[in-house]
Image (cartoon, grey):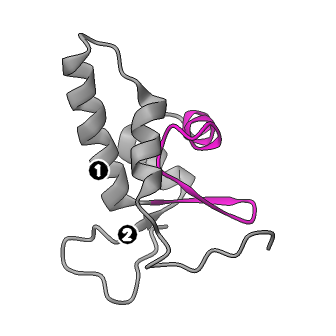
Amino acid sequence: MMVKWENDDARNDGEVMTIKDVAQYLRISEATVYELARNGSIPALRIGKSWRFQKELLKEWIRKSAEANVRNGGEMPVAELGQESRDKSWSSSIAIHPGT
């Protein structure tokens, strides 16, 4: 089930994806998506016990990961790439309240 923000444009880059959505999109297991989210390797947002992913940030993460893979001769510094994507704030789209 993909959730869309009210004012999304036709490109659907504003889609918010669940663990299951991301696993299908990346063609990896849900367990791998959980692990990538938990260790900060993939751009993700935790809301309570749930994880959410913005499709636009995932696309950027994939692109940067592929570029780094080529530059590094097959080595992909996933954690560093995840940090760059996390630095892009979701705060313009969602209010994050620590401790709730």
Residue 36: which quarter of the image? top right
Looking at the image, the residue that sits furthest to the bottom is: 6
Q: Residue at x 32, y 88 (%)?
A: 7
Q: Which residue is mark 2?
A: 15
Q: Are marks 1 and 2 in contact (CB under 8 Å)?
A: no
Residue 12, position as x, y percentages in the image: 27, 71
Residue closest to the eye, 33 or 62: 62
Residue 46 within the segment the image draws in magenta: yes
Residue closest to the eye, 76 or 30: 76
Boundaries of the magenta span: 31-53
Is 44 left or right of 87, judged from the image as shown?
A: right
Q: Residue at x 49, y 67 (%)?
A: 1
Element marked by disc 1: helix
Residue 59: give its label. 1
How far apart are labels 1 and 2 at the CA level? 11 Å
Residue 99 within the segment the image draws in magenta: no
Looking at the image, the residue that sits furthest to the top is: 73
Q: Tell me the amino acid under the disc marked 2.
A: Glu
Q: Quadrant of the C terminus?
A: bottom right
Q: In the rendered view, would you say 3 is above or below 50?
A: below
Residue closest to the eye, 44 or 97: 97
Residue 48, position as x, y percentages in the image: 74, 66
Residue 83, position as x, y percentages in the image: 47, 43
The local crowd at label 1, few if under 14, some if 14 to 19, many if 20 or more residues have their Cα within 10 Å, is few
Q: Residue at x 26, y 38 (%)?
A: 64
The local crowd at label 2, few if under 14, some if 14 to 19, many if 20 or more residues have their Cα within 10 Å, is some
Answer with mark 1 or mark 2, whichever residue precedes in sequence.
2
Is 35 left or right of 71, judged from the image as shown?
A: right
